[in-house]
Amino acid sequence: MSTFGRDTPMERPNPGGRAAVFVPKVNAEDAVKDMLKNGSGMVGFGNSDGSVTVYFENNRFNDSSLHKWESKVWKSYGRMVELSPTVNKLVCDASNLTQVGFVQGPEIEVRDMPLLLEWLERTNAADSAPEGPLIHA
């Protein structure tokens, strides 16, 4: 069982609240890698047992409004804070993921842009990358 950073939120946020933004590690478990594809946008929070709860959007149906990575993040964040029913949710050991930033209010802040870009490149979604580390809704 792994742990996560001290700055990882430890509870599901209310709308506008702070959530972590994650990317999967290269050596993530196969079950995790199989769910997270196409430059998935992933948001979530830590759990007291060392796991993380992650909501994700991988644009499985190629919706043009979800092409950009940040659009996927906003979709995932909306599902999480509104408690929407979804199959795009997982709870996994924190060792499978790396936190690259935060969502709070109308802003996504990417703190590790190189790692995000590497994830998007690895999943053939480099063209969905944000223009910079601060993204406003």
Image (cartoon, grey):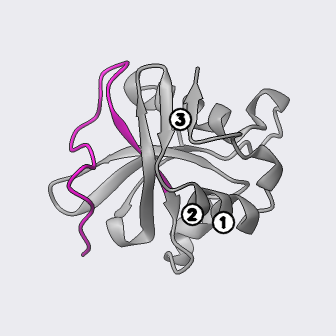
| Residue 39, position as x, y percentages in the image | 69, 53
- Label 2 or label 3, whichever comes before in sequence order: 3
Q: Are marks 2 and 1 in contact (CB under 8 Å)?
A: yes
Provide the residue designation for mark 1. Answer: 118
Q: Amino acid at mark 1?
A: Glu
Residue at position x 57%, y 63% from top? 115
Q: Is residue 94 magenta?
A: no
Spatial CA distance of label 2 from label 1 is 5 Å
Q: Which residue is mark 3?
A: 76
Asked if marks 2 and 3 touch (Cβ < 8 Å), the reply is no
State which quarter of the image contains the N terminus: bottom left
Q: Main secondary structure of the magenta part?
A: loop
Image location of residue 47, percent across then percent down: 22, 52
User: Which amino acid does the dot numbered 3 rest on?
Assistant: Ser
Residue position marked by numbered label 2 in the rendering: 115
SS assignment at label 1: helix
Q: Amino acid at mark 2?
A: Leu
Q: Residue at x 32, y 25 (%)?
A: 17
| Residue 11 included in the magenta stretch of the image | yes
| Residue drawn where x is 33% and y is 32% of the image | 18
* Corner quadrant of residue 81: top left
Task: Please tell me which residue is depicted at 49% across the width and 26% down the height of the picture.
Answer: 107
